[in-house]
Amino acid sequence: MNVEFEGAEKLMARLDKMSDEAALKKSLETATLLVERSAKQKAQKDTGALRRSITSKVEGLEGIVYTPLEYAPYIYTCGA
């Protein structure tokens, strides 16, 4: 008895691509968290509000590290 599946190669290629994207997304999440940690370490300590506000997220295959504080872009960080 011989069984054949139509489109098996196409399905396998698609599954491989999904696996690669999942690995890439996991790596991106790790890298984004490293950048977030570095930004928090370099942020000034006055009240701690800036450090606490720094966060990150991954949307699709894009990592974003940000703070909602309006004054954040104007803060000078030594060694940055």
Image (cartoon, rainbow, N blue to C red):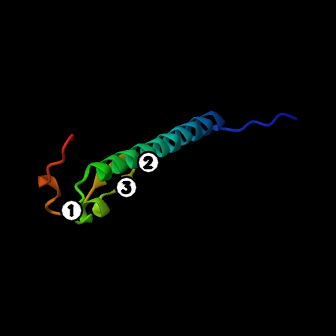
Q: Nearer the viewer, residue 25 or 3?
A: 25
Residue 29 numbered mark, or none: 2
Give how far across and how far down residue 59 sits, in percent.
37, 53
Task: Tell me the residue at 11%/54% (across/down).
Answer: 74
Q: Earlier in the sequence, mark 3 or mark 1?
A: 1
Q: Is residue 8 above or below residue 64?
A: above
Which residue carries the number 1 mark? 46
* Pair 3/1: label in front: 1
What amino acid does circle 3 point to? Answer: Lys
- Measure the alpha-carbon separation of dots 3 and 1: 25 Å
Instruction: Answer left or right for 59 relative to 5.
Output: left
Instruction: Answer left or right for 29 relative to 42.
Output: right
Q: Earlier in the sequence, mark 1 or mark 2?
A: 2
Dividing the picture into quadrants, the one containing residue 16 is top right
What amino acid does circle 2 point to? Answer: Glu
Which residue carries the number 3 mark? 57
Taking the view exactly as shown, the residue that stands out farthest to the front is: 46
Q: What is the secondary structure assignment of the residue under circle 3?
A: strand
Q: Earlier in the sequence, mark 2 or mark 3?
A: 2
Residue 65 numbered mark, or none: none
Q: What is the secondary structure assignment of the residue under circle 1?
A: loop
Task: Tell me the residue at 31%/53% (across/down).
Answer: 40
Q: Quadrant of the C terminus?
A: top left
Task: Tell me the residue at 23%/66% (across/down).
Answer: 47
Asked whether the residues under the numbered discs 2 and 3 touch, taking CB atoms below 8 Å apart as contact, a structural biologist would say no
> Is residue 76 something that shows in the picture?
yes
Give how far across and how far down residue 51 sits, in percent.
29, 59
Q: Nearer the viewer, residue 30 or 48?
A: 48
Q: Is residue 2 above or below residue 37?
A: above
> Is residue 61 something that shows in the picture?
no
Q: Quadrant of the N terminus?
A: top right
Q: What is the secondary structure assignment of the residue under circle 2?
A: helix
